Image: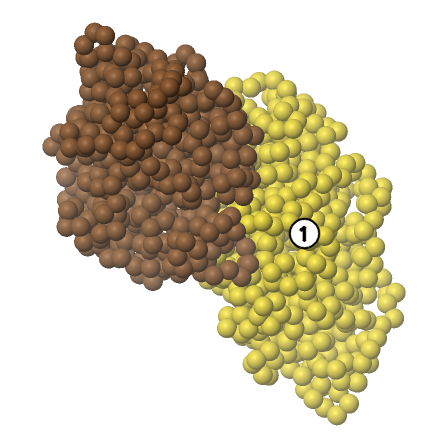
Chain colours: A yellow, B brown
Amino acid sequence: MAKHAIAVLLLFIVLFNLALQSSSSQPPRPFSFRGAPKFLGRFSTSKSHHSNDRRSKQILGYRYETRYFEQRLDHFSFAELPTFNQRYLISSEHWAGPDRLGPIFLYCGNEGDIEWFAANTGFVWEIAPSFGAMVVFPEHRYYGESLPFGSREEAYKNAATLSYLTAEQALADFSVLITNLKRNLSAEACPVVLFGGSYGGMLAAWMRVKYPHIAIGALASSAPILQFEDIVPPETFYDIVSNDFKRESTSCFNTIKASWSALISEGQKENGLSQLTRMFRLCRELTNTEELTNWLDSAYSYLAMVNYPYPSDFIMPLPGHPIREVCRKIDGCPDGTSVLERVFEGVNVFYNHTGEVNCFELDDDPHGMNGWSWQACSEMVMPMSSSPDASMFPTYEFNFSAFQEECWTDFKVIPRPRWITTEFGGKDIMTDLKTFGSNIIFSNGFLDPWSGGSVTQNVSGSVVALNTQEGAHHLDLRAATAQDPDWLVEQRATEIKLIKKWLSDYYKAKGATSLSNVATGDKATFM
Amino acid sequence: MAKHAIAVLLLFIVLFNLALQSSSSQPPRPFSFRGAPKFLGRFSTSKSHHSNDRRSKQILGYRYETRYFEQRLDHFSFAELPTFNQRYLISSEHWAGPDRLGPIFLYCGNEGDIEWFAANTGFVWEIAPSFGAMVVFPEHRYYGESLPFGSREEAYKNAATLSYLTAEQALADFSVLITNLKRNLSAEACPVVLFGGSYGGMLAAWMRVKYPHIAIGALASSAPILQFEDIVPPETFYDIVSNDFKRESTSCFNTIKASWSALISEGQKENGLSQLTRMFRLCRELTNTEELTNWLDSAYSYLAMVNYPYPSDFIMPLPGHPIREVCRKIDGCPDGTSVLERVFEGVNVFYNHTGEVNCFELDDDPHGMNGWSWQACSEMVMPMSSSPDASMFPTYEFNFSAFQEECWTDFKVIPRPRWITTEFGGKDIMTDLKTFGSNIIFSNGFLDPWSGGSVTQNVSGSVVALNTQEGAHHLDLRAATAQDPDWLVEQRATEIKLIKKWLSDYYKAKGATSLSNVATGDKATFM
């Protein structure tokens, strides 16, 4: 159950770290991540999930076939390069078939094993039957089993082998795959609807824009397509995280804000690091305060993303409204409790809600050779700062030169910070999408720090933003639960209604009526 | 004055030849082009034009600066490759400037020296002042002076060096260039309007589809974006050429249709080739009948493309309605004149209208290493056949396997015949463009054999086809002349009106009014 959240959080924690990475040249600096951390390093329980097909299927009951499709490494040149096999999961169980123009629901795989996403995107599986839809989950190149050059080791060897890990190539993979699949099934006329969350949501929105002939619409959930260049202020992300805490409790916000300097002071004392190691119950001795700082800010950022209104166990078992719980702990300490002790009580909610942890591990992958950190260092350059006032994090200003240096050190790659907006737009999204766009849903939860880089206003009649004040990171894509609040049920119902509209418009344009039985939801339970 | 036509005809003759190329494995075969011919081989006068900046400028009076912009060789990967300098021509003479949101007219350079296109796209230069528009003509990579790897020789060395010669890379070049240019001029908000003819028109239409955030609209003149796979019947092109002759005279059509077998019979006789050499006044002895066949069919295809209603001197000085003139000659021979003698009289109109040619050269580039033939062998696979009935050309059925073999022989490249429709669409253009497209003009002349592969129906209110029954190949993009027939004047006026609408919609969306003075054409002379 925890996989989807973990997978999507990969994006954030790496971005978070990358944004802070370049501060290493600016002392004093509480943040100094060298290279991207290993995504799941500190969540040991999650690992076994990802490599176990059976378990996913048994747990969640989604039935699919696993297939492989041979892809070009570079779609946009004729350079002689080895091909690779892209994994994809497919279910035709509820498909209305080509004669009835049964739709195809295509999830745009993001930066991780596609089985995580499939297992944790219950919404798509749950609505497929009522739409008579085929479900396809293609894996993103360079992740999971879809590895060029034969192995992960070879694919991630260096800048030369990694250089084809780009969003454009991934979109071309999806396009070639689905076109081929449809042709083989004589299903060329079957409409494709795109789904995606987080980076996958960005891909879904971009695919609708760049391959409109392939997909009739896209549900892009929590997709920060505006988190580039100067489109949104670089402080946006941390301001939202901070505000998630402030809205629960100003004193909580202030305690966390005060903790960073307390932490540095403590670390500079004689035996300070040992003291901190004991105070935070770490399994091994701290070598610097930055390790601890990273551990803490990761918790706060994660918490903001998974600040769901009911108990969940995405990364860790967490209570509902987990930030409220963290602040209750921080604020609830007896008078005289130090700032650092309060903060420790707070993060215990995140790292040790079950109370089973004896000591905490801080270790990350020392090499930082993971896919998203490459992407963030090449084309996915998302500038992030931490403002002196609104943010509870240490003040930090994004510095592109320093960022570029770190990327060169880590990958021998020169970032192209302006490429994404050139290729996909974003600088003037309202005008652009109004003029050329149609059939895109940008769904957001305003507690999610990524909502600040997403499209949160309606652009036109068919390019709409579905926002929830109390939602966090693409909750809408998850399977329905009995605890879903009304606003979530409503958000999903609106999504279903809009997707039906796209389909019925398509069928009308095609002069087809036979599908309308399916499209208008004879069997629909999500109306 | 002849440059534009020559440049655009490059596309056709190569395609023509490539389409016929693969017949070499199917005897008897009058067509057997081995590799693509040298585009301008037989038009010696045109050569000097292309390398002479001064002359273009003096003749036509279009003033511009020539600049160079450093481009990545592969925009879609981070592979370490050498950059190259893209040439572009720019004129800000009449530009209203960034404060007034002065528009930018961007011509999508096609397969040749950009100065040809600039010199022969008078329409853009002529309307720019009334729009207060900047004019930019970027050159297509691998053509003119925009050569990767330092020289034409290196760029065209082999499949490895040629592999980045693709339409997608060219569109990315245009997008990166114009984005950079606008940023440097603080002109980010200035709307870009695309223009292009033939392959350049295809690029303009595709760029509007793939980079809608960069350009607000496109005038795609004679752009055969549907000449792929099975979207239009493969016989379309030759059927239209043939019909251009038939509509003038059935006996003319029949004579040409009968000439191919007469030619083969003659060639098989003892001394037949010598006889043909003399009859067709060739400068050197024929070695096979195919050479002569190619020479003849090139003439007919060219004639159909430049079948303009007034005298022109695009490739050769030609009378108005040149096909009518050819048929007048063929039909007007005294009774008893042989089929081959008649045909010779006919093609004399094309090859020797001035009467100054003493003998005819047939030579083509024996290597066929030119840019378009690479493009046609890699992604621009346009299947073409010649039908037994409607076509006056020898019957020929496109055979992909044979085509693929020839491409391998010539370039060591494997064609990707389905890629263009995957990347750009086209299979269901009406539905697709209706759903996502806006602001595209497809202009066509129905005498043009390429009109059969173009969009010739209105798709929506803003994706429209402007067809002329009597027009040939993108005449609308040429400078106005005193002899322009009313329908041509009208076609251009409608284009101007539509472009103004795009701009005024854009300004309205921007809440700008200052530009409306420019946009609604205070100084317009083309209303």
Q: Residue at x 39, y 53 (%)?
A: B152
Residue at (70%, 69%) from the top-left corner?
A367
Q: Is residue A369 visible?
A: yes
Q: Which quarter of the image is occupied by the C terminus of chain A?
A: top right
Q: Residue at x 62, y 36 (%)?
A: A178
Q: Measuring from the top left, give residue B298's x and y in whole percent.
A: 33, 28
Q: Position of residue B344 (x, y in %)?
A: 25, 21
Towards the viewer: B435 or A167? A167
Relative to the observer, which residue lies in front, B75 or B498? B75
Instruction: Tell me if B395 is positioned left or right of B120 in this view.
Output: right
Q: Quadrant of residue B481?
A: top left
Q: Do we see residue B306 in this rendering?
A: no
Q: Which of A72 and A317 lies nearest the eye of the viewer?
A: A72
Q: Which residue is mark 1?
A: A148
Q: Choose between B408 and B272: the one closer to the eye.
A: B272
Residue shown at 55% from the left, 24% from the top? A507
Q: Amino acid at mark 1?
A: Pro
Q: Is residue B369 above or below residue A378?
A: above
For the view shown, which residue lies furthest in the front direction?
B270
Q: Residue furthest left?
A: B482
Name the subunit of mark 1.
A
Residue A239: image location, x then y, percent? 57, 65
